[in-house]
Amino acid sequence: MHKTRIARVGAVVAGLSMFAAACGSSSSSSSSDTTAAAATTAAAVETTAAATETTAAAADTTAAAAGGDTAGALEGMKGTTPLVKLSDDFKTRLGTTPTGKAGLKDYNYAGETYDAIVIIALAADLAKTDGIDMAKQINGVTKDGEKCTDYASCKAIIDKGGDPDYDGISGPITMNGNGEPLEASYGVLTFGADNRLDDALTTYVPAKSADSAIVPETPVEGTRAGDGQLKIGGLLPQTGSLAFLGPPEFAGAELAIADINAAGGVLGKDVLYSPGDSGDTSTDTASQTADRLIGEGVDAIIGAASSSVSLTVIDKITAAGIVQFSPANTSNKLSTYADKGLYFRDAPPDVLQGNLIGQLVVDDGNASAYILALDDAYGTSLADVVEATLKAGGVTVSGKKIYDPKASSFDAEVGEIKAADPDAIVLISFDEGSRILRTMVENGIGPKAKKVYGCDGNIGNALGENFDGGK
């Protein structure tokens, strides 16, 4: 994905200094002439200095208007992401993983990735196989049983012949019959004056699907047998437009595997893990990784993070009788996808997040809002839900623009928003959101001028870093 660097406009002001020297002379007229000349010169310098200051002030004003002053430009922007208040212990333990040792800037979907792997492991324990039959146990592991909060305690319940109800790092999951959660916790994150998330402003909002959303179990199709050792493959974003989600997801996967194996593994053996990159839809990275993992004989694949990427590989994964479990897919399109009962996710569908974003706009007292969303399954799905929620809440939708995330410039889109002059702007993007925000700031409609709302696809410290770096 090509990045366009936008030069920051700045005014450079030259300061003038004058050094006076006393010249001795035996002629009084000469001394008087010299004094008069010096006074004239001094006056001229003062006039020049005043003119310079005026020019500098004008230059500063021009630079600010052009977006040159971007310090704190994101302050006040809000965004949502599935998130619970992660414990300090979990964060510390993430830091002990190979990925965590390199440092984590964000924790988006770390808990969901960890939980996805634990759920798969418990399902294999219940089914007593790493074959396709473990898929039949995945939904049940999360509900209607004896509560437990880690792999070791849940496995102890299974070993005694009981039925576990796993509530994990990401909170109560309670899977629906179509393999997605019925409830979730969202974090509402806010940028501070340093263009980074201000943790002190983070709030947590529970969300739950209506009872009418409950559907029966999707039958599992296929006959793939296991070999007695659970092997999980990774299909997570090391590169591409969601690469900022990669590190917390990698760390979550690594920690889950370590915890499971420390508790005795699955079916009496250590769980094996084969990581892989999902890239994004501008490449065929995900397809290549899926082919490799299928060839390696994995029993389950964790990922992708992007709904659109998952939709490019779900058919080949499920056709192979392999479980696909995403910690971050949210597109409503996946709720009814023909997946042979083998696709799961513990990230809530967009119907929950879209309602939350729309309600934030309503609750903040905005009379009008403009929706700018990327053109893919995630962006269009979330935009539709946000639009419906805004309208139901009495907010006028000034416009809804679906844009090409690979575009080299977003001047036209931002120009349309400026012309519409809404109270609020909802930005549904991936990493290109930093360039959109910069263009918004340059046009005087950034978070300092308008209330701007983000989503899980862009909200994170990486957005602030990219914005500051002109990426």
Image (cartoon, grey):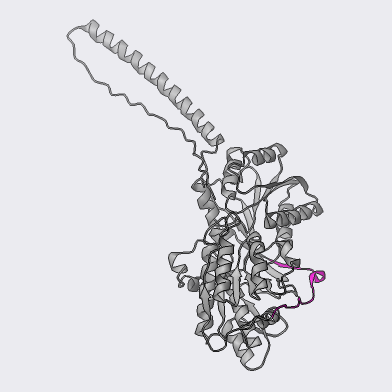
Residue span colored magenta: 206-222
Give me the residue at 58% from left, 63% from top: 286
Q: Quadrant of residue 178?
A: bottom right
Which sits in the foreground, 70 or 377? 377
Q: Is residue 358 left or right of residue 235?
A: right
Residue 157 percent coordinates (x, y): 63, 89
Instruction: Give the main secondary structure, helix, strand or loop, of the magenta stretch.
Output: loop
Residue extending furthest left? 26
Q: Is residue 75 visible?
A: no
Q: How many marks?
A: 0
Looking at this view, is 326 or 248 the one in front? 326
Q: Is residue 226 above or below residue 392?
A: below
Q: Residue 203 at x, y = what percent?
A: 63, 62
Answer yes or no: is residue 225 visible: yes
Front in this rendered view, residue 254 or 316: 316
- The residue shown at (56%, 45%) is 73
**Residue 123 vertical position relative to residue 183 in the rendered view, above or below:** below
Q: Position of residue 230 (x, y in %)?
A: 57, 81
Q: Nearer the viewer, residue 179 or 187?
A: 179
- Residue 130 lies in the magenta stretch: no
Q: Is residue 216 highlighted in magenta?
A: yes
Left or right, residue 204 beside residue 35: right
Residue 153 x/y as whole percent: 59, 86
| Residue 91 against residue 29 in the figure, above or below | below
